[in-house]
């Protein structure tokens, strides 16, 4: 007879395995292959977006999107440049590959890109399908999205000739899943008409709004963020009905709410002014910058801001009244010491005056320090103390090697920053000392790590660590369960709710 204790042990193990089975969520990967209408675009002060850039808005967190689409590419040039080989080498069985070309294939004058619809274009699509299937991946063909063009009577003009039909024919003959983006966008732009359709394209960007486009742009091919989101919604709508397992991960239908629309988030690159040599004498900024994709960068936070509708921007000089006027939010992170920059830029009383005026007028200031030895404190506090906050030159929650539990925070106050966050991670932070109008937001192991202050019409948020950088947002090092990414989303929602719109 089996002892009762052993029976109970077996039952407990089975229950744990069953629970794990229910809890484990399948992970899906989608690869995007195409041209500029699909491609990711630089985020800094840039109104242009590809629909693939916004596609993750419509998908659950069980899906990772790898956007290999590139500006100006056709089926021919994408193959010739080795870009397709790079995708193939990354594919695993079960991956989805979405393929959308046509805009540049039609350019007869460009021999490096031209691919005739009925011959080379068709054959290239067949190759994409054949190659993807050889790796166990699932190819999905998309007809090219329409450009914006109307005749004098307001009737929409289709400019894609035989390319959409070529895609449909390959899909039909090869039993390939099809997203007919050409037909869907044709219906949309026909319904909208000449005026209402402008908001989807760069032609709607006014002069002077973006430094990258000071004169605006007469562009009826490339999308604004709003346009990219709308086109991505057309793709998601058709994708969810396809017989592909990842299609069940479409979680948003229609147009999602973009809470940070009109919010410009300026990141300081004056007090934090670190450079590294990448090859020979070529140098690049790094360390808490929007476009730094390494562990120490803020690129993941920039994506979250962008997909919420906000505009990541930078300030590369000392803050002044006129420069701050273009921002809803101004973030200063980890000001330099001589160890990091040969000639650091220190906060001066005059600069602090300008920032204080801006905050009192309605600006949202975010100050992120660092632990002792890794940030400048004396001059940084000239600014912070204007708002009742002092960054202390100390260090709390030291994490040695992989002892991540030493940096765990499991209890949160009822604050928008932490909505839905079960527990998060913050390590080696400096503590904050507060006096009115500042008040405590979060304490970890007895030390204040986050505080806020209402000043005039504006707000100040202070954190004793850069905290929301890549290494701890996408779990590059953290074990599963730490939800710093949810905290970053809460941070962006708080900015959207608190900051004033400037665009």
Image (tube, grey):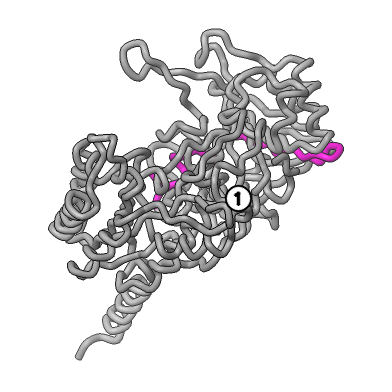
Q: Quadrant of residue 10?
A: bottom left
Q: Which residues are magenta?
A: 453-479
User: In the rendered image of this protein, does residue 23 appear above or below residue 114?
Assistant: below
Element carrying mark 1: helix
Report the label total.
Answer: 1
Residue 3 is left or right of residue 16, and the answer is left
Instruction: Name the residue furthest right.
Output: 456
The image position of residue 103, as x and y in percent, is: 35, 47
Q: Quadrant of residue 394?
A: top right
Report whether residue 213 is seen. Answer: yes
Q: Which residue is mark 1?
A: 199
Which of 369 and 363 lies nearest the eye of the viewer? 363
Residue at point 56%, 51% (across, down): 200
Residue at point 50%, 50% (across, down): 149
User: In the rendered image of this protein, does residue 162 appear above or below residue 313?
Assistant: below
Residue at point 56%, 8% (across, down): 343
Residue 321 is left or right of residue 224, and the answer is right
The image position of residue 31, as x and y in percent, is: 31, 52
The image position of residue 126, as x and y in percent, is: 17, 57
Instruction: Name the residue furthest bottom.
Output: 1
Residue at point 34%, 71% (across, down): 242
Q: Quadrant of the C terminus?
A: top right
């Amino acid at each position: 007879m089996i002892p009762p204790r052993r029976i109970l042990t077996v039952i407990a193990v089975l229950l744990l395995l069953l629970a794990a089975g229910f809890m484990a969520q399948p992970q899906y990967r989608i690869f995007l292959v195409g041209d500029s209408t699909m491609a990711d675009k630089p985020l800094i002060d840039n109104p242009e977006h590809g629909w693939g850039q916004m596609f993750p808005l419509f998908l659950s967190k069980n899906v990772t999107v790898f956007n290999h689409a590139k500006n100006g590419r056709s089926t021919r040039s994408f193959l010739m440049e080795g870009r397709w080989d790079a995708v193939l080498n990354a594919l695993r069985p079960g991956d989805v590959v979405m393929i959308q070309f046509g805009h540049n294939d039609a350019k007869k004058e460009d021999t490096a890109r031209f691919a005739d619809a009925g011959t080379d274009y068709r054959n290239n699509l067949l190759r994409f399908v054949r190659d993807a299937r050889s790796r166990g991946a699932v190819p999905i063909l998309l007809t090219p999205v329409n450009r914006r063009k109307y005749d004098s009577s307001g009737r929409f003009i289709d400019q894609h000739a035989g390319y959409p039909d070529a895609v449909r024919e390959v899909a039909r003959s090869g039993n390939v899943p099809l997203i007919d983006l050409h037909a869907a966008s044709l219906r949309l732009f026909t319904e909208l008409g000449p005026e209402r359709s402008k908001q989807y394209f760069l032609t709607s960007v006014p002069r002077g709004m973006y430094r990258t486009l000071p004169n605006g742009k007469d562009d009826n091919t490339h999308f604004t963020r709003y346009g990219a989101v709308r086109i991505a919604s057309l793709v998601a709508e058709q994708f969810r009905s396809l017989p592909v397992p990842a299609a069940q991960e479409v979680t948003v239908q229609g147009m999602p709410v973009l809470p940070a629309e009109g919010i410009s988030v300026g990141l300081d690159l004056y007090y934090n002014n670190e450079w590294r040599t990448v090859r020979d004498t070529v140098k690049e900024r790094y360390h808490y910058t929007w476009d730094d994709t390494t562990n120490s960068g803020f690129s993941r936070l920039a994506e979250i801001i962008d997909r919420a509708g906000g505009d990541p921007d930078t300030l590369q000089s000392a803050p002044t009244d006129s420069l701050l006027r273009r921002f809803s939010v101004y973030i200063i992170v980890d000001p330099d010491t001589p160890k990091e920059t040969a000639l650091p830029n220190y906060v001066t009383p005059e600069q602090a005056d300008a920032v204080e005026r801006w905050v009192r007028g309605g600006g949202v200031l975010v100050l992120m320090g660092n632990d002792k030895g890794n940030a400048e404190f004396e001059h940084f506090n000239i600014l912070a103390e204007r708002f009742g906050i002092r960054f202390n030159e100390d260090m709390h929650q030291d994490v040695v090697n992989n002892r991540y539990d030493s940096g765990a925070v499991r209890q949160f106050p009822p604050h928008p920053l932490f909505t839905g966050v079960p527990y998060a991670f913050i390590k080696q932070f400096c503590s904050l000392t507060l006096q009115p109008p500042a008040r405590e937001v979060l304490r970890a192991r007895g030390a204040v790590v986050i505080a806020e202050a209402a000043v005039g019409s504006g707000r100040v948020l202070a954190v004793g660590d850069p905290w929301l950088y890549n290494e701890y947002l996408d779990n590059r090092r953290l074990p599963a369960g730490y939800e710093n990414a949810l905290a970053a989303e809460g941070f962006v929602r708080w900015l959207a709710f608190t900051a004033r719109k400037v665009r």
